Image (cartoon, helix red, strand yellow):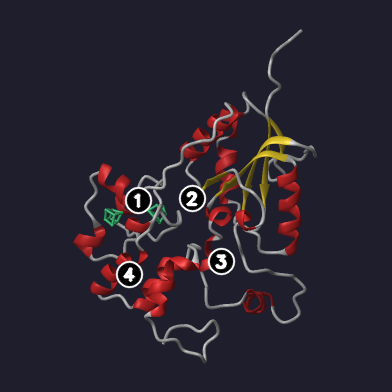
Amino acid sequence: MSCARPIPKVAVESLTGCAGELLIILENLEKLLPFIRLSRFTFAQSTNEVGPVDITFVEGSVSQPHDLEKLKKIRANSRWLVAVGNCAVWGCVQKGGCSACSPENMLKSVYGEQSNIEVMRAAPPREYVKVDVELSGCPINATQFLSVTASLLKDHLPYITHKPVCLECKLRENPCVLIEQNLPCLGPVTAAGCGALCPSLGAACYGCWGPCESPQMDAMATILAEKGFSIADILVRLKSFGAPDKLFERIESLLPRDPSKEGNLYV
Ligand code: SF4
Ligand code: SF4
């Protein structure tokens, strides 16, 4: 009698997103294929199976009713559900990029009045189903993705750092573009994982990994205001990658609102 474990089945699925995560997974697939059976990945293969799998990686936010239906089926068929990419962890730009616009008006502005596409307020999968692991990025980092997958294939929940980008930036001994060049770098409130990519090239972090653990948004806004940026611009920048609204309640309570504008934008 053989006691060999069956080869783990893996699926890769997509909701509303740009397919950036799918490309990273595709680029790294040959490193995984010796250890898994790829049951479903419609982006990459024409023959796909249905039914239960050990791990599903899902990218994208829930932004349309059919996303939600699909997500519930994915959850029911997956032992481990792994949200990959900022869309699936925070909702990304479709949630935060225009916090003052309604989904219906955004739809009309792109597709016109006659569109029959149904839209919902964009939200990450965790708002609807249990998610076992969340791996952010825009897109995800390939090394983090392989490390998370290796842990799950050994039946361990992976460790994912939520320290700020500044930590990686200092480890690379970069000059600080916030202090030395007055650029609006969001590294202090953004989760690490990219290796401080933008500051390493002399650019400000714009927060694409989503918030770090216990982000000090008030302090970040204060520093940027002291450097001459308007609070309205600071809030747009801080919110554009889907960070939860509750992180901004205090800053927003200090701002006068303009009741004539959709979403009650600041005056
Ligand atoms: S450049 Fe940005 S990420 Fe780097 S230390 Fe300064 S604030 Fe932090
Ligand atoms: S430095 Fe910031 S904006 Fe640039 S890749 Fe990293 S998290 Fe994204």
User: Which residue is painted at 32% across and 57% down in the image?
Assistant: 188
Instruction: Give the quadrant of residue 31.
Output: top right
- The residue under label 1 is 165
Q: Amino acid at mark 4?
A: Ala
Calculate the distance from the C-alpha at mark 3 to the C-alpha at mark 1: 22 Å
Distance (Cα) linking label 4 and label 1: 17 Å
What residue do we see at 30% from left, 47% from top?
Answer: 167
How many other residues sit within 10 Å of disc 4, few (<14), some (14-19) or many (≥20)? many
Figure quarter occupied by ligand 2: bottom left
Q: Which residue is mark 3?
A: 95
Q: Is residue 161 left or right of residue 39?
A: left
Q: Earlier in the sequence, mark 1 or mark 2?
A: 2
Compared with 160, 224 (above or below) is below
Q: Is mark 1 within 8 Å of ligand 1?
A: yes
CB of mark 2 near ligand 2 (< 8 Å): yes
Give the residue at mark 2: 137
Give residue 173's quadrant in the image.
Answer: top left
- Tell me: residue 232, above or below residue 71: below
Closest to the observer: 22 or 190? 190
Alpha-carbon distance for marks 2 and 4?
A: 23 Å
Where disc 2 sits, the SS reads loop
Report the mark closest to the observer, 2 or 4: 4
In the image, taking residue 94 as reference, residue 165 lies left or right, namely left
**Amino acid at pointer 3:** Lys
Find disc 4 in the rendering and name its residue: 221
The answer to the question of whether label 4 and label 3 lie on touching residues, with beta carbons closer than 8 A, is: no
